[in-house]
Every structure is written in C-alpha cells, then in structure tokens.
Image (tube, helix red, strand yellow):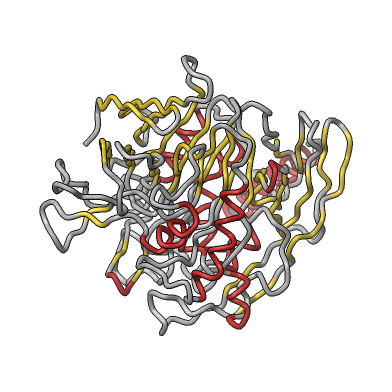
Amino acid sequence: MNQRFPIGSCRAALLGAWLAAWLAACSSMPPAPPKPNPDPIKAAFVVLGDGGRRIARVITADVLCPSATVDGAARDMQLRAGPQILPQRPTRSEPADSKPSTFPLLVCEMTLPSAASRASVGGHTLAVPTRDPKRIVIIGDTGCRIKRSERAFQACNDPVSWPFAQIAAAAAAMKPDLVIHVGDYHYRENACPAGNPGCAGSPWGYGWDAWDADFFTPAQPLLAAAPWVVVRGNHESCNRAGQGWWRLLDPRALEPKQDCNDPANDEQGDYSEPYAIWLANDSQLIIFDSSTVGTTRLSPTDPVYRRYEPQLRRALALSAGVAHNLFVNHHPILGFATDPTHPPDGVYPGNESLQSVLAAIGGETLFPSNIDALLAGHNHLFEVVSFESAHPVQLISGNGGTWVDEPLPGTLTRGAAPAPGAIVDSVVSTTLYGFMTMEPDAGSNGGWRLQARDRYARSLTTCTLFGRKTRCIASNLQ
C-alpha cells in the first residue's frame, strides 16, 4: 500500500536533516579567532629638546602608560598629561563658536639614553636619532585652513587641495635622518559650513580630534621615519591651539601655568626659552619661540619687547664657539611676502617686531657673524633670500599643505628690502606645494646643499649655502 506525505512535511524533514548535518560539521571546526583589539597607540614619535635631548612620546587610548623597549631592555614611560576636557580658548577666527577642547587620551614620554640605538613601544618602532644627520627634511604650515572670519574653507577631503598627507609620505620615502617642522600644525579653527563637500565632516576646534585630523594622522609616516625638531607657530599661541601644543608636541616639561589652559597665565604660556641642537660639520640649530610676536616695531617699554629682549640675547649667546649656526623660528625675520594691496609688485618686509629687538642687540646686521642662515615658515611658500649686505640668508619652507600665498613678483621694486640696511642680492621662490631638504655639502666644511621639492619629492631647485652666501639653480620653479 502506498503511503503519501504532505509536501510541507517533506520539506521540513529535509531541512531538519540538512541542519543536523551542518551542526555536526560545525562541531568539528575550530572556533573562530577573536577579533584583534584596535591599537590603543594613536601616535609614537621622538622629538629633540635642549642640547639634543631625545624624548620618546606616545599618545595612547590605554589607561596606563606603556613600557618601551630600548636596546632590548624594558623601560617605563611617564605620564605627561592625562585625559582632560578644557574650556575652549577664545578663537581669533570666530569668538561666537563654542566647543570645549577635549583630550581623551594619555600622553606619555621618556628620555632615551644618548647611546640608545634601537627603541620601540607597543609594536611601533621609534626613530632613534643619529649623531650625524645626513638628510634633513624641513616642512611647515601643514594644516588644513578652515577659518570662517576669512571665508577660508580649504578642501580638507581632497588630497590635491590639501596635500599634507601626500607630502609627508613622499618625504618619509626619502628616509630622512631628521625632520624640522617650522610651525603652524593646526588650522581647523571653525566648523565646515553646511553643504560644503570639500571639508564636510571635518573636526574643528582645539581638541584632540582636530589635532589628529590636521597633523597626527597625515604625518604618521614621517613621524615614524625620523626624529623631529618642532618649532612653535602663531597658530599654537595660547589663544589658539596652545593647549595642544604644550600637551602633545613641545619637548619641554609640561609645567603648571605654562599649559595655556588659563588665560590669566598666558604671560608664561606664550613664551619659552630658546635652546640649541647639534647637527654636524660644526653646525647647530638655535630654536626660538616667536609664536606670539606681531608685525610692527616694538618700543622698549612694550611688554612683548621686554620678554623677547632677554630671550633673544640668550638665543644669540648659544651660538658662541660654534662656527655655523641656523636660527630657527616661525616668523621670517628677513623674508618677503606678497602684499596684495599693492599689486603687481608690492611685498611685505620681514618681521619688524623681531627686527626692532635684534637691532638693539646686534646692530644693523641683527645677528652675530657665525649665524649663517635663518630658517622659518609662516609665509606659505618656499623662499631663499640672500644679501649683498652682511645679513644672514633667509630660508622659508611654508608650503607644506595649507593654502599657499600669492607668488612673489618676478622682479622686486627697486630698493625693496626686508629690513633697514639689508641689500638684497637674489630671491628664489615658488608657491608649489612641497618641502625642503638639507644635506651637508661634500665640497665644503660647514656648507649645505638645499633642495626645494614638490609634493612628489621631485627637485624644483638646488641651492648651496656656505656661510652667508647662497647660489641657487632654478629648474622647475613656478
């Protein structure tokens, strides 16, 4: 006798048999590996401080500072700053905006022994300094500019319009021994306007999220490639991104009342002592904090003059006994910038505030004769100004990512001078995005070979610097 089963029952029986077989097969399979925890370390790098002191620094989401491994031995890192939510400093670009400065991470550090040759932390290799750097990358003014008061909304989401990440990767690929950043790391001061796709979604304000987007994430390959000399720019003054500057980058100890958290203490937080870092070939860097300087001449009774005068004396004294010195600060003391109010050949002179203090110390040439060159950013271009008079050469590397300036006029107005008594011999410049490299010149003792490079690290021009004289061969400048 034939027995009939409903179709639904057949399907149920087949499904049950298939499920039983599948479960039996799965029971013999090894369990899936757990998903790895995300890396708590957001940045790991080395900055150089007074006398070349090597400071390993880590920014981490962990609850404790990690241990570093130095030449195979474990070493504890110390807490520099813990998580903190700070009242927003009044931004110069839009006082009506209100957003607290949130720093949710630990900042940890340790001083590397001078003899250390290898170091790492949490799987991140730290760039241990060499005693004799052969290739130096110089970069500045790197952040993406979002500033409502100027209607300046750079397309941070477009690597063509904001190429800092591309520049950092190209510079890292050159395997430098040292990186010098001449200031202005942070530019995202306001919210991106609604409907603007170029900067849509960008963090803003002065907390970690804006610092990370503007600097730490795009700079990652270059932070890993070499130790850094960090110079403070005007964007890192106390009434702007000074809180992040002191917490995250400055090589000095983080001291109470010098952290830019309380406006009542800005008289301390806006200034810091100069220091020197040895290079090679009887050469050194002298680092000077000019973050809060203005542009006009200062009276000796001005409070800013009274702060800068003793600091500049100490900075110049650091050059004693060293044959070749490079004075490094953010504001070009003897450089030019285009003056758009006087086209087509108008230019702004150098920084008259610093000139007024330096002239009272060193006379018309401003600097001792063993300070060969001045290295700065602030003007958003590459520039080399050399002089017939006995002034040091001015080098500017401020084309690292933020909107570039208008090009300098092809011919300067007759008699144009960046400072009284400074007679210009030549000016070489470009507003193409990029960076500068500096290497010891094999043909001279104490000389340097300088190259302006574009965003792909292609050479734009080559200059030689020896003493206070330069010679440049312009090849692909625009």
Look at the image and tell me in which quarter the N terminus lies: top right
Q: Is residue 289 above or below residue 431?
A: below
Q: Position of residue 440 (x, y in %)?
A: 51, 23
Q: Position of residue 346 (x, y in %)?
A: 16, 55
Relative to residue 355, is residue 88 drawn left or right?
Answer: right
Q: Quadrant of residue 374?
A: top left
Q: Quadrant of residue 202?
A: bottom left
Comparing 430 with 174, the one in front is: 430
Comparing 107 with 242, the one in front is: 242
Comparing 141 with 365, the one in front is: 365
Q: Is residue 168 above or below residue 355?
A: above
Relative to residue 20, is residue 245 drawn left or right?
Answer: left
Point out the residue furthest to the left here: 344
Q: Position of residue 404 (x, y in %)?
A: 30, 51
Q: Is residue 143 above or below residue 148?
A: above
Residue at x-position 46% and y-position 36%: 372
Point out the residue furthest to the top here: 443
Residue at x-position 72% and y-position 46%: 55
Q: Position of residue 406 (x, y in %)?
A: 22, 51
Q: Is residue 226 above or below residue 377?
A: above
Look at the image and tell me in which quarter the C terminus lies: top left
Q: Quadrant of residue 143?
A: bottom left
Residue at x-position 61% and y-position 72%: 260
Relative to residue 92, is residue 343 drawn left or right?
Answer: left
